[in-house]
Image (spheres, coloured by chain):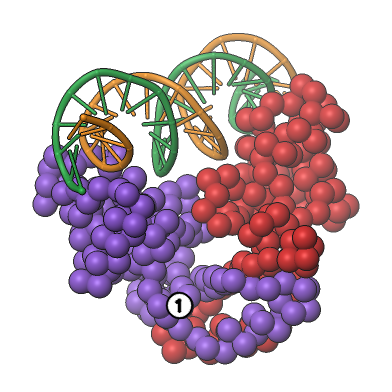
Chain colours: A purple, B red, C green, D orange
Amino acid sequence: MRKRIADLAKFISERGLKNTRQRETVAEVFFSTSGHISAEELYQKVQKVDPGIGLTTVYRTLKLLTEAGLAKERRFGGEPQGVFEKQDEKHHDHLICTRCGKIIEFNEPALEAIQDEVAKKFGFVVEDHKMELYGLCKSCRTA
Amino acid sequence: MRKRIADLAKFISERGLKNTRQRETVAEVFFSTSGHISAEELYQKVQKVDPGIGLTTVYRTLKLLTEAGLAKERRFGGEPQGVFEKQDEKHHDHLICTRCGKIIEFNEPALEAIQDEVAKKFGFVVEDHKMELYGLCKSCRTA
DNA sequence: TTATCTGCAAACCCTTTGCATTTAA
DNA sequence: TTAAATGCAAAGGGTTTGCAGATAA
């Protein structure tokens, strides 16, 4: 978290941008959440810290964070609304409950091996991958 | 294709819906295409067969096909636009070129095995999965 | 006959943009 | 001082909905 704020500050100064109060607040709130968050949800949280900050600024800051490699946008299922997650060193994938919407992150090294194999077959060089498993989570199954 | 049209007809009559000329045209054009197609693209193709059909009807028919289990909506990357693909018996995943946008479908049985393993770990029962590999395709790498 | 479908236009949702003002550097 | 950032409102893109007329059953 401390490191991420520093990374952002670096990114900002390197580009001749400005380190504003709003930017910092949005970034701090974003980094302090775990999992996935939509722009609207982040906006709600940010409002509690500083009610003057606009939704537009939240969008713009998320875009900035994405460009800085500190956030990543995702879209699950057919949802029109994008969600953002912190971009961390270790790659992970997602288990998504189709009933309650719960999302669990997991990491499975065996997947990395398979992806390289498949890619080779088609002459691709893989930069990234995404795997999503859809199903019923424990509590939804027993409920 | 013939079978899909029949499946749709069955779905329609079972629900007391009507088998209209527009519905049939949209479905036929959709089933005759391969890979992924957006509502707008499908609309363009449908126009050539019957210029009177509206975009709205294309959307509604795609929704109907999805409900009937004959189509599936997807969103690649952070794209706001959804695309539809035929829902076929054999599952497949996607290789997506980040430069030219080309999408290759592939099938890798080893993935099915891994997903079950992961799901078990978290008490999930998997119904479906989605794997997307992002990278550079052959021609984009050499270009 | 009558409930469903259609096409149009308008509404909708999420996101981005234009602009006048404010602010960091 | 001045280029960048802000917040608002308005525009944008993709999709859905309300409605009056058309149509399958």
Q: Does residue A98 appear to the left or right of B69 in the view shown?
A: left
For mark 1, what is the residue?
A: A92
Question: Between B73 and A11, which is closer to the camera in this rendering?
Answer: A11
- Could you tell me which quadrant the C terminus of chain B lies in? bottom right
Q: In this view, does A92 lie above or below B28?
A: below
Secondary structure under the numbered disc 1 in the rendered image: loop
Question: Between D3 and A128, which is closer to the camera in this rendering?
Answer: D3
Q: Which residue is drawn at 48% across and 57% down?
A: A75
Q: How crowded is mark 1: few (under 14 residues within 10 Å), some or many (20 or more)?
A: some
Question: Between A97 and A105, which is closer to the camera in this rendering?
Answer: A105
In the displayed image of the protein, which residue is found farthest to the right? B2
- x and y percent of residue A46 in the render? 18, 51
Where residue D20 sits, quadrant-wise, is top right
Kindly tell me whether residue B19 is visible in this rendering. no
Looking at the rendered structure, the kind of residue marked 1 is His
Where residue C7 sits, quadrant-wise, is top right
Question: Between B27 and A90, which is closer to the camera in this rendering?
Answer: A90
- x and y percent of residue A61 in the render? 31, 50
Kindly tell me whether residue B43 is visible in this rendering. yes
Q: Which residue is drawn at 20% across and 55% down?
A: A24
Q: Which residue is drawn at 81% across and 54% down?
A: B34
Q: Does residue C3 appear to the left or right of A108 in the view shown?
A: right
